[in-house]
Image (cartoon, grey):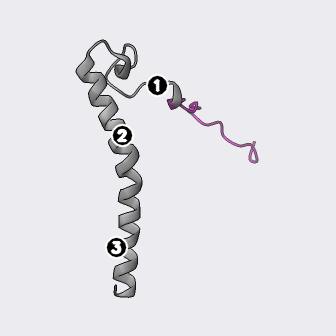
Amino acid sequence: MLYHAREPHYRGSAAEYSVERLDRFHGDDPASSDDPLLRIAYAISEQAITFLGPTFWILLAYLLLADEFGH
């Protein structure tokens, strides 16, 4: 009995978050909604994120390197 390991009180299972929907829309995809303004807003935001996301990181790296090496 001295060398026996204690059983844990709780054996939880790992949560599978990839199947969870984290948005507040519980129906179909909002980008394919019947509302044309919503579809336009999603298209604009998708293009903005696609373009501005990498641009932000490139500018951030440039500014850090410029500051490090004294422009």
Q: Rate crowding at label 3 as few (under 14), some (14 to 19) or many (20 or more) other CA atoms within 10 Å.
A: few
| Label placed on residue 63 | 3
Location of the N terminus (image quadrant): top right
Location of the C terminus (image quadrant): bottom left
Residue 16, quarter of the rendered image: top right
Q: Earlier in the sequence, mark 2 or mark 3?
A: 2
Question: Residue at (40%, 60%) from the top-left corner?
Answer: 57
Q: 37 or 18: which is nearer to us?
A: 37
User: Residue tagged by mark 1?
Assistant: 20
Is residue 25 found inside the magenta-colored segment of the image? no
Q: 18 or 52: which is nearer to us?
A: 52
Q: Amino acid at mark 1?
A: Glu
Q: Position of residue 52 (x, y in %)?
A: 34, 51
Q: Amino acid at mark 3?
A: Leu
Q: Is residue 69 left or right of residue 36?
A: right
Q: Position of residue 42 (x, y in %)?
A: 32, 30
Q: 21 or 43: which is nearer to us?
A: 43
Element type where label 2 sits in the image: helix
Q: Earlier in the sequence, mark 1 or mark 3?
A: 1
